[in-house]
Amino acid sequence: MQVLLVEDDIDLGQAVCEHLEAAGLRVHWCKLLAQAAALPPPELALLDLQLPDGDGLTLLRRWRAQGLRLPVLVLTARERISERVQGLRAGADDYLTKPFDLDELLARIEALWRRAQPPGLAALGDLELDLRQHCARRGGRALELTAMEWALLKCLAAAPGRIVERDRLETALAPLSHADSSSNSLEVIVSRLRKKLGPTRISTHRGLGYRFEA
């Protein structure tokens, strides 16, 4: 997931970037409203309101006027209820008052992203999973996946940026092992998926499991 952070506080911006990137998210950090406005719309935005060159709500209103439905989480030191209401009515999807816990920020981002996806559809960068049709597309092109490859991909993609334990993955694959005539070892299936998704999309964490890099 590509996240745009619009925040002029250097210490806070650095902390947010490091925390989100450690969780597997890609973060583009802008310190000025004009810098953010010049960029293509992101997949999700974290928007401060009090910026050196204007109010973040200006950019939020512009996005909404253009019909853009990207999830927007407002980060602000403004605590008055009336100001929160103003932000929500301008089109914000959620509101987090400074100071905030970084784990709570990540959890809210994940919740906003889940709600933004159409029913049965999960988008992870250039990868799209159709949970109803049991298929995946990369860059708009359908991927040919075996039943075990799909099961493994679905399990990993359900927790992007987080290590999924080996035992959990093997449990998810076990009911399908009889249906796959090729080798059904976890390592072999991961290797086949890497060839179809790209070599860096699934990382190995020895003694722990595997992680899907969103």
Image: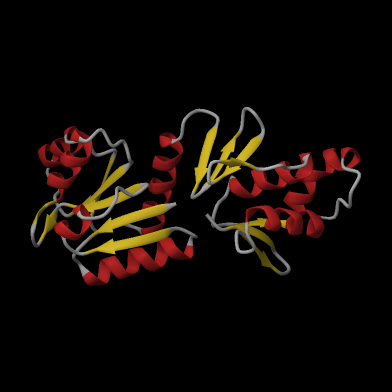
Q: Is residue 146 left or right of residue 89?
A: right
Q: Is residue 12 above or below residue 81?
A: below
Q: Is residue 195 above or below residue 57?
A: below
Extreme-front residue of the structure: 141
Please give the name of the residue rendered at 68% of the width and 65% of the height, measured from the top-left corner. Answer: 204
Quarter occupied by residue 165: bottom right
Q: Is residue 146 above or below residue 36?
A: above
Q: Position of residue 135 (x, y in %)?
A: 65, 36
Give the mark count: 0
Q: Is residue 60 left or right of residue 179?
A: left
Q: Position of residue 35 (x, y in %)?
A: 19, 60
Q: Is residue 130 left or right of residue 69?
A: right
Please give the name of the residue rendered at 38% of the width and 52% of the height, measured from the top-left corner. Answer: 104
The coloring applied to the image is: secondary structure
Please give the name of the residue rendered at 39% of the width and 41% of the height, measured from the top-left corner. Answer: 112
Extreme-left residue of the structure: 53
Q: Position of residue 36 (x, y in %)?
A: 22, 56
Q: Position of residue 172 (x, y in %)?
A: 76, 43
Q: Is residue 114 left or right of residue 50?
A: right
